[in-house]
Image (cartoon, rainbow, N blue to C red):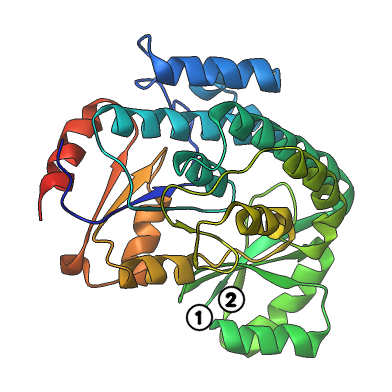
Amino acid sequence: MEQTTITSWLFPGQGSQYLGMGRDLWSRAGRPLEIVAEAEEISGFALRQICLQGPAEELTRTDVLQPALTAMSLGCAHLLSEAGLHPDMVAGHSLGEFSALCAAGVFSVTDCLRLVTARGRLMQDIAQHLQGGMAAVKRVGPVPLQEVIEKSGAPVCIANLNSADQIVVSGPNNALTALAPQIAAAGGELVPLVVAGPWHHPSMEPAAESFRAVVDATEFRHARCPVFMNVPGAAQTNAARIKELVRIQMTSSVLWQASIEAMFAAGARLFLEVGPGKVLRGLMRRIIPDEASYRVRGIENQRSLQFIATEAARP
């Protein structure tokens, strides 16, 4: 199948899941079903049952969700590849970066599932001891927000720069609570998020250190296409450099807006959200409001593939 538009595949991270995800994707025999079966074997969780039947509290557990969401995203990526569609560039939001790297050929499906299973377990374990969380910041930009944080002296960091009007901070729960009035004084609002821990915060370092041993034991290859990494929000293809950035990802900010802007500047005009939910499509429209200048679509199952294949062939 001829592909004429420069296409970017975007892989979602935690927060994109929903109860019932994967129902159509895993309803028939084939590679997507094999991938989730392998994820179940590696993780030790009945991922399909949890995704389809819940309970929701079980699905949102970090150690369960990370292999489950990754298995679904990789299954969707297989559908695209099987239809003759291939990415010109890829990116993934936090956890989604591992699916993006796999889609770019940096490591195998098996290694990807092993990495995210270890990552999820380590994050779940440390979160139980940190008493930390995350919060969205409204109506305050990244520069004045950083000034407020530095002035307060709070052990809080900017965890996600998702778009100009969607910034997420991370840190101890009491520090986030104490920061709220200072955000309000700057004209903004701090909205707590329902997450298990202070993701992308320096306090995750013990988990990150353990995860680096797993990363270092995994073979990384040069990427087949540019991977726009969360850190530093720019394209990478070199295996050693990619591994270096993966090693620090857990404690570094997710520079999603920078990644999308760089992909658009590189010519991407069709963006495919490969996996569950619509979070990344929503962020696309916030980052690049001129929706006439690009197309953004989602793939979660076989039914969505035909329309996407038609889109990819359009100039």
Of label 2 and label 1, which has the lower sequence position?
Answer: 1
Disc 2 vs disc 1: Cβ atoms closer than 8 Å? yes
Q: Is residue 79 above or below residue 217?
A: above
Is 137 positioned to the left or the right of 204 in the image? left
The type of residue carrying mark 2 is Glu
Determine the residue located farthest toward the top in the rendered image.
Answer: 29
Residue at 35 percent of width and 62 percent of height: 284
Name above or below for residue 314 compared with residue 192. above
- Please name the amino acid that badge 1 sits on: Arg
Residue receiving disc 2: 189
- The local secondary structure at tag 2 comes to strand
Vertical side of 206 occupied by 47: above or below = above
| On-image quarter of the N terminus | top left
Number of dots carrying numbers: 2
Residue at (45% x, 44% y) in the render:
104
Horizontal relation, residue 69 to residue 298: left or right: right
Q: Looking at the picture, how far across and down is residue 105, in whole percent? A: 48, 40
Task: Give the spatial CA distance, label 2 vs label 1.
Answer: 7 Å
Identify the mark at residue 39; answer none if there is no mark. Answer: none
> Which mark, residue 139?
1
Res 199 seen here? no
Give coordinates of residue 272: x percent, y percent.
Answer: 31, 48
